[in-house]
Image (cartoon, rainbow, N blue to C red):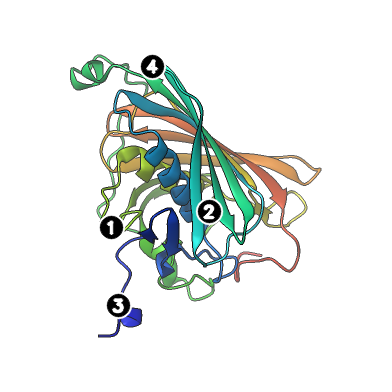
Amino acid sequence: MAERDRAPVSLFNRDGSTLYPTLLTRGPWDHGFLHGGAVCAAVGWALESAQPDPALMLSRLTVEIRSMVPLVPLQAVATVLKGGQRTKVVEALLVHDDRPLVRAVSQWVRYDPAALATGREAKSVAAISRPERANDPGARLDLNYPRPGFNCDAVELRPIRGNTEDEGPGLVWVRLRHPVVAGEATSPALALMAMADLGVAVGWQRSPRGAAFINPDLTLQVNRPMQGEWVLMASRVHASAAGVGFCETVLSDDAGLFGRVLQSQVEAPEELSIAGIT
């Protein structure tokens, strides 16, 4: 079997700081560009690589998407803006042809893993059981999802209420099916960064004027590391008549609530659409 005919087993291949996107990174807006989850995974890999201290955990991630990211080799570079034993700030850029397409800033803080191991952390919500059957977004023939692609193949979705194809709010269990980088272990923090953008898919709604929303940014905030590989996303859009909104996602795992994602929403141009949705 030729290399080009093999099904991809990771989101990216890597040579140094250059990431080579596989077909699993493709998004639904344009099949030649990365899904927002793959974008967050790429900058997340760079951030985590620059911050190898196991005593620090990711507490905040802010990603600014300046331009759609094409399916081409990308430079993922990170810089420690503030070092320290209790907190550290790391910035990452995703660059193509010397042009920064994405900027991310992250906060890493010292935490007490022993408290998590003994169960002394507060459980804000009871765990909700996962359905046995996964949802297949690609089964909808009226939707122009790429196969393979991020929505259908990079993640597994088990909906409880709503799904990623119908307007929200929604409540969906999600897990990452593949490593972010070939041959490298994907930490829970990196998996969470890769999944965080899916909040807008779980809770998506049209604007009050009937247009599709797109999100140019994402802010993830957590108070402890994710437990296990599954995250429960409770997502909904809050929009105004001005054509601007935000999507709010509450994050839980089997141990309870642990974080939130906020994503700005702006109306998409008419030429940018997902077949069957706009």
Q: Residues within 10 Å of mark 4 (few under 14, many from 20)?
A: few
Sequence-first disc among 2 and 4: 2
Distance from Cα at disc 4 to Cα at disc 3? 44 Å
Q: Amino acid at mark 4?
A: Gln
Q: Which residue is mark 2?
A: 36
Give whichever of 254, 107 is nearer the camera: 107
Between disc 1 and disc 3, whose residue precedes?
3
Residue sitting at 25 percent across and 57 percent down? 183
Q: Is residue 62 visible?
A: no
Q: Amino acid at mark 1?
A: Arg
- Give the CA separation, mark 4 to mark 1: 44 Å
Tag 1 residue:
133
Residue farthest to the bottom?
A: 1
User: In the drawing, does residue 110 fall left or right of residue 107?
Assistant: left
Which structural element holds mark 3? loop
> Is label 1 or label 3 in front?
3
- Give the number of the disc on residue 85: 4
Residue 101 pos. (x, y %): 62, 53
Q: Nearer the viewer, mark 2 or mark 4?
A: 4
Q: Is residue 135 left or right of residue 250?
A: left
- Which residue in the structure is indicated by mark 3? 6
Image quadrant in which the N terminus is located: bottom left
Earlier residue among tags 2 and 1: 2
